[in-house]
Image (cartoon, rainbow, N blue to C red):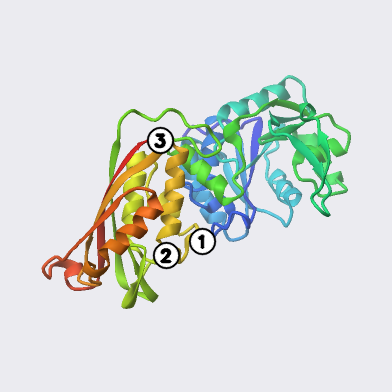
């Protein structure tokens, strides 16, 4: 068997953060972007660059999950991967990664798993700068916003800051191995990034061009932005490209069983006296089918991509939250809703008396006409046995 040559380069992928601000229901690196995790996508960029030893630093208890992601992303380079447990601080986690490096490694890159969409070219630029003689290199992007210095006590603006001297640091940050190891060992404070630790002991830190897609996934809007980019569409922070001419149509379906807690919510309405539907949110199969149809029409994935169980803010949410968020995703991608038609299949509840009310609520939520019809299945299937509700939606979207 031919083994992969021992590389001169290593990448320490820091994935030990808790992800508190993301509120994803798991440590940040293990939240899903699509069918893959943030960590998996970060590793795809790592393995697309120069062959390197890869050390992944994770929270205790997630070592197995990380190794599964790594082996899947690494392919033929799986023998270059190891996983270690991180510490309480970033510096402790990076130090744990450095301790696992092979003796032959003399260049180390430290990369945040949260910068999951970083292109391989950024890795290459950092390594090239180290090869050219730098001891510490970071990718950086110019600051384009007007920056103000404020009084933290009352929020009052004190002065403007000259942004021509500012840059936003990204990862991977590259170092001569001995320089980084010594800086972390001798650091007298806990620094926000590894370059700061190296600079604090007197080493110059150089910059190379970063990339706009190497943003850090920290909050729920960041997660939406990354998912939109993966779906091939621009996000709210990226100016939308011109939408294709002409309308597009999508279909969506959803099914929920009776047996949830609380009241029944369906078609954006509460139905007192009816048995609730089970689900991560309120189980509103009508609203969820509409969401799937709209996302499909706009080419933005499906409801699981944007509203999965890794999004705790949608736990127990009603139709207006789902639909308004979906309309926002469409608008960011250059679409608006033309109209929606949805059919409910269920024995209960009886829609006839509240159909107009449901149409009014749903139409207001999407900003376009929504028609609702209801039928039964003549006793056939689970809906015929009154075990749950099914909904089928067709949506038309047009360029905004």
How many other residues sit within 10 Å of disc 2, few (<14), some (14-19) or many (≥20)?
some
Task: Name the spot of residue 318 as percent of width and height, x first.
Answer: 42, 63
Which residue is painted at 65% across and 29% down in the image?
Answer: 210
Mark closest to the chain's N terminus, 3 or 1: 1
How many other residues sit within 10 Å of disc 1, few (<14), some (14-19) or many (≥20)?
some
Task: Name the spot of residue 255 as percent of width and height, x first.
Answer: 28, 62
State whether residue 70 appears in this view: no
The answer for how far apart the CA atoms under marks 2 and 1 are is 9 Å
Task: Name the spot of residue 393 as percent of width and height, x first.
Answer: 26, 52
Write down the residue under mark 3: 400
Mark closest to the chain's N terminus, 2 or 1: 2
Of residues 331 and 13, the one nearer the viewer is 331
Write down the quadrant of residue 389 in the picture.
Answer: bottom left
Of residues 230 and 27, the one nearer the viewer is 230
Mark closest to the chain's N terminus, 3 or 2: 2
Which residue is painted at 60% across and 35% down in the image?
Answer: 214
The answer for how far apart the CA atoms under marks 3 and 1 are is 30 Å
The answer for how far apart the CA atoms under marks 3 and 2 are is 32 Å
Write down the residue under mark 1: 312
């Amino acid at each position: 068997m031919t083994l992969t040559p021992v590389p001169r380069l290593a990448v320490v992928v820091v994935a030990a953060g808790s992800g508190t601000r993301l509120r994803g229901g798991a440590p940040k690196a293990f939240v899903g972007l699509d069918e893959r995790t943030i960590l998996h996508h970060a590793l795809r960029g790592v393995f697309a660059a120069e062959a390197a030893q890869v050390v992944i630093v994770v929270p205790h208890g997630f070592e197995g999950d990380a190794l599964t992601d790594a082996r899947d992303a690494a392919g033929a380079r799986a023998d270059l991967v190891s996983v270690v447990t991180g510490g309480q601080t970033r510096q402790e986690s990076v130090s744990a990664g450095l301790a696992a490096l092979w003796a032959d490694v003399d260049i180390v890159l430290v990369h945040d798993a949260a910068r999951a969409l970083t292109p391989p070219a950024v890795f290459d630029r950092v390594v090239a700068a180290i090869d050219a003689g730098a001891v510490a290199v970071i990718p950086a992007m110019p600051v384009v916003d007007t920056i103000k210095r404020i009084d933290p006590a009352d929020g009052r603006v004190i002065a403007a800051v000259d942004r021509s001297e500012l840059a936003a640091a990204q990862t991977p940050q590259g170092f001569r191995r001995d320089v980084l190891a010594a800086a972390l060992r001798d650091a007298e404070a806990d620094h926000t990034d590894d370059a700061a630790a190296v600079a604090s002991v007197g080493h110059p830190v150089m910059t190379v061009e970063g990339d706009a897609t190497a943003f850090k996934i920290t909050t729920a809007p960041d997660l939406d932005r990354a998912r939109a980019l993966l779906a091939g569409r621009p996000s709210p922070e990226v100016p939308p490209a011109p939408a294709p001419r002409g309308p597009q149509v999508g279909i969506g379906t959803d099914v929920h069983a009776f047996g949830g807690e609380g009241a029944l919510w369906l078609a954006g309405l509460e139905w007192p006296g009816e048995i609730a539907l089970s689900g991560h949110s309120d189980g509103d199969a009508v609203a969820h089918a509409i969401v799937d149809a709209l996302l499909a029409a706009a080419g933005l994935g499906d409801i699981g991509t944007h509203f999965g169980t890794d999004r705790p803010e949608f736990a127990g949410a009603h139709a207006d939250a789902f639909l308004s968020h979906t309309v926002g995703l469409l608008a960011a991608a250059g679409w608006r809703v033309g109209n929606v038609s949805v059919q409910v299949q269920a024995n209960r509840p009886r829609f006839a008396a509240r159909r107009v009310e449901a149409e009014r609520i749903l139409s207001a939520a999407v900003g376009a006409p929504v028609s609702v019809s209801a039928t039964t299945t003549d006793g056939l299937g689970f809906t015929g046995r009154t075990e749950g509700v099914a909904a089928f939606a067709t949506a038309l979207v047009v360029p905004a």
